[in-house]
């Protein structure tokens, strides 16, 4: 199902030349030269825009993921008790560790944010901080796929894949789900995998640099030759699909070729930020000509979102503890890490708002878990994994701004009020897109699966 030729005269000329040289069989020639009629599964477009279950608040998602487990008690959940009791015994063989940074109130709402994120603090009135997150696993792999897929143990489709499956996409020349990741996170490509959903809903990984996607330039000598090659491919695709009209994965694979062809036209322009104004580049902390850094990721996320991509994820960090938030040994590394993402994140919020896009774009900032409030040695400079209480935040798309939701105990160890599980967060994001998480299902291996499994509730307290 490759796109028809834009120039019918050139198409027919090339086909006649191939026929004259004996390269096309008479039957193939007749069908390629004749009018095209599609029936059955051929008419299905797995990425066609689909109506939501109910009227949505948002059309798209930009998902910002900080790899490694960002410490909640050093960023968005102040704990004075820890500061006052720093170095004192907590329980057997452990000691309290206070935050290494001070907190201050920002905006009209007065929500407290640490000195690590002053730029994010400056837009806090557009953000709802969730201080009562709880993940289903305490190791990187399980927690990372937990927040993305709803399962910490089995392969399941990513949330971006579910959104693509449920809503399709507005731009048929770009993927519905794009992941901008300089490095592979914990769990690798499973983070954006489609698993049992049709493969077309899998995330397309973009690597920042001069060529974000490989093979974007056509290999054929001319556009006419490439179109002829694709027309021939289309013919054989249709013949193959006609005998397998119930195979949704096959239909999706054929559609993926069409999307790839369209991407050659639109993707290079989407990744080209050279026409952005100096003011916009400054907003993201970008130098003109740069194609790297989280500023580039956030700006390209905005450009993809405004071009109809349904779900864009920007991932900061990989599996190396030198390049992620897994500060077991040395918390001060956060100065560098936060400094690299704080301005771009705030710039994204401001940019979306100035363009009128924040109202219908859900922005999510999260990580796989937090860090421990206690350490085994009073002189320890790092923190361990902590999944029973941590922070995420949401903005735009009908979420409340200037609010802190949920409460953890005085040391940030356990959630004491309004717990939000990863399934609750997933259900609420889907809700803002007009999707009922209990009805967004896919039949596989004899049962209906969904992103939230048998869990999840809408967190009404974080909605505007």
Image (spheres, rainbow, N blue to C red):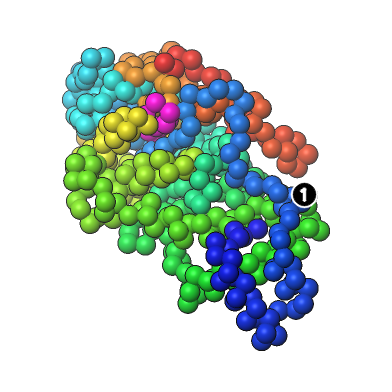
Q: Nearer the viewer, residue 199 or 283?
A: 283
Using the image, determine if residue 459 lies above or below residue 46: above
User: What range is drawn magenta here?
Assistant: 358-367
**Where in the figure is residue 438, as x and y percent of width and height?**
64, 25
Question: 26 left or right of 296?
Answer: right
Look at the magenta stretch and give its main secondary structure: strand
Residue at 65 percent across and 47 percent down: it is: 45
Residue at 29 percent across and 35 percent down: it is: 351
Residue 297 visible? The answer is: yes
Residue at 53 percent across and 19 percent down: it is: 458
Using the image, determine if residue 458 lies above or below residue 339: above
Q: Nearer the viewer, residue 69 or 60?
A: 60
In which quadrant is the N terminus drawn?
Answer: bottom right
* Residue located farthest toward the bottom when viewing the structure as drawn: 21
- Tally the numbered discs: 1
Q: Is residue 197 magenta?
A: no
Under tag 1, what secondary structure? helix
* Residue located farthest toward the right when viewing the structure as drawn: 243
Using the image, determine if residue 340 lies above or below residue 217: above
Residue position marked by numbered label 1 in the rendering: 40
Question: 156 left or right of 348?
Answer: right
Residue at 55 percent across and 22 percent down: it is: 55
In which quadrant is the C terminus drawn?
Answer: top left
Q: Is residue 361 magenta?
A: yes
Question: 153 left or right of 349?
Answer: right
Q: Nearer the viewer, residue 22 or 124?
A: 22
* Residue located farthest toward the front when viewing the structure as drawn: 9
Using the image, determine if residue 6 lies above or below residue 232: above
Question: 309 left or right of 79?
Answer: right
**Where in the figure is residue 199, as x and y percent of width and height?**
61, 51
**Where in the figure is residue 459, as x and y percent of width and height?**
49, 18
The residue carrying pointer 1 sits among few (fewer than 14), some (14 to 19) or many (20 or more) residues within 10 Å by Cα, namely few
């Amino acid at each position: 199902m490759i796109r028809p030729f834009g120039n019918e005269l050139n198409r027919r000329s090339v086909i006649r030349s191939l026929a004259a040289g004996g390269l096309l069989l008479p039957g193939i020639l007749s069908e390629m030269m004749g009018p095209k009629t599609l029936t059955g599964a051929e008419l299905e477009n797995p990425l066609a825009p689909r109506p939501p279950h109910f009227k949505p608040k948002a059309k798209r998602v930009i998902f910002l993921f900080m790899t490694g487990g960002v410490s909640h008690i050093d960023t968005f959940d102040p704990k004075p008790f820890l500061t006052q009791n720093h170095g004192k015994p907590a329980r057997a063989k452990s000691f309290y560790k206070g935050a290494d940074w001070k907190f201050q109130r920002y905006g009209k709402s007065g929500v407290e944010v640490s000195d690590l994120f002053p730029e994010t603090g400056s837009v806090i009135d557009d953000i709802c901080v969730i201080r009562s997150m709880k993940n289903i696993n305490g190791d990187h792999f399980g927690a990372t796929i937990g927040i993305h897929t709803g399962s910490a143990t089995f392969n399941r489709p990513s949330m971006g894949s579910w959104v693509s499956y449920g809503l399709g996409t507005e731009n048929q020349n770009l993927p519905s789900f794009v992941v901008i990741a300089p490095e592979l996170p914990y769990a690798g490509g499973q983070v954006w995998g489609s698993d049992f959903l049709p493969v077309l809903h899998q995330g397309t990984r973009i690597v920042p640099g001069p060529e974000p996607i490989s093979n974007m330039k056509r290999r054929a000598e001319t556009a006419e030759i490439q179109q002829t090659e694709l027309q021939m491919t289309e013919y054989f695709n249709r013949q193959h699909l006609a005998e397998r009209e119930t195979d949704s994965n096959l239909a999706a694979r054929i559609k993926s070729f069409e999307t790839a062809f369209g991407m050659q036209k639109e993707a290079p322009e989407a990744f080209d930020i050279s026409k952005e104004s100096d003011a916009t580049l400054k907003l993201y902390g970008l130098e003109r000509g740069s194609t790297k850094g989280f500023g580039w990721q956030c700006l390209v996320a905005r450009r993809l979102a405004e071009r109809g991509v349904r779900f864009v994820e920007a991932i900061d960090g990989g599996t190396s503890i030198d390049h992620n938030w897994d500060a077991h040994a040395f918390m001060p590394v956060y100065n560098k890490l936060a400094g690299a993402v704080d301005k771009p994140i705030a710039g994204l919020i401001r940019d979306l708002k100035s363009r009128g896009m924040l109202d219908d774009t859900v922005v999510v900032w999260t990580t796989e878990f937090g860090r421990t409030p206690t350490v085994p040695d009073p002189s320890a400079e790092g923190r361990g994994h902590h999944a029973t209480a941590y922070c995420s935040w949401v903005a735009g798309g009908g979420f409340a701004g200037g609010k802190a939701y949920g409460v953890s105990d005085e040391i940030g160890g356990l959630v004491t009020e309004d717990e939000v599980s990863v399934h609750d967060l997933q259900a609420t994001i889907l809700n803002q897109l007009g999707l009922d998480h209990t009805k967004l299902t896919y039949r596989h291996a004899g049962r209906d699966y969904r992103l939230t499994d048998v869990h999840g509730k809408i967190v009404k307290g974080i909605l505007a």
